[in-house]
Image (cartoon, rainbow, N blue to C red):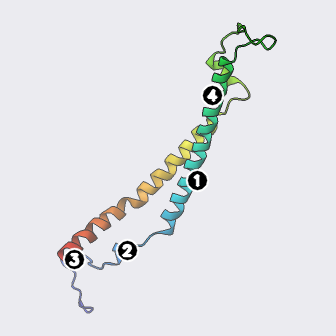
Amino acid sequence: GADGVAPAYGVDTTLDRLDLSTNPYLEKHLEFLSTWVDDLSAEQNKFQYYMRTIHRGADKRFDKRNRKAPVQEEKVSAKEAWGSSEAPKRLESLLISNQIRNYCDQVDQFTEGGFGKLYVMNGLQKKA
């Protein structure tokens, strides 16, 4: 060609397509992903706290008047425990998990081509 680069077998050999710079799109998605993981962790902490509270309530079966004899209480079923108004809502965790999966899918789609570019560049550097 006129610019000194002759395409071999009709293939464009410009290296502009091998841009390896950090993309702000990917960076933002990773920041959002990190935020959603933190939110999911907070939701899991709510579940653990609630379970510990239920467990402590089951262990404290003492009569308040004499503090010696255990009070015969009925066992609370799981359905009643999770149906109470104090129980953390499971829908929030489900929505957060779904959002995390969406961000992971988007990051995966975005980085698919990037690994190929890195592999090509690594091969070019080894030959040079």
Q: Earlier in the sequence, mark 1 or mark 3?
A: 3
Which corner quadrant holds the C terminus? bottom left
* Disc 4 and disc 2 in contact, CB within 8 angstroms: no
Which corner quadrant holds the N terminus? bottom left
* Above or below 106: residue 16: below
Q: Secondary structure at mark 4?
A: helix
**Residue 10 — which label?**
3
Q: Secondary structure at mark 2?
A: loop
Q: Give, as a three-letter code, the residue at label 4.
A: Arg
Q: What's the CA distance linking mark 1 and mark 2? A: 28 Å
Note whether residue 125 is visible.
yes
* Quadrant of the image occupied by residue 70: top right
Q: Which residue is mark 2?
A: 19
Q: Which residue is mark 1?
A: 35
Q: What's the CA distance linking mark 4 and mark 2? A: 52 Å
Location of residue 19 in the rendering, given as x and y in whole percent from the top left corner: 37, 74
Q: Which residue is mark 4?
A: 52
**Residue 1 — which label?**
none
The extreme bottom residue here reads 2
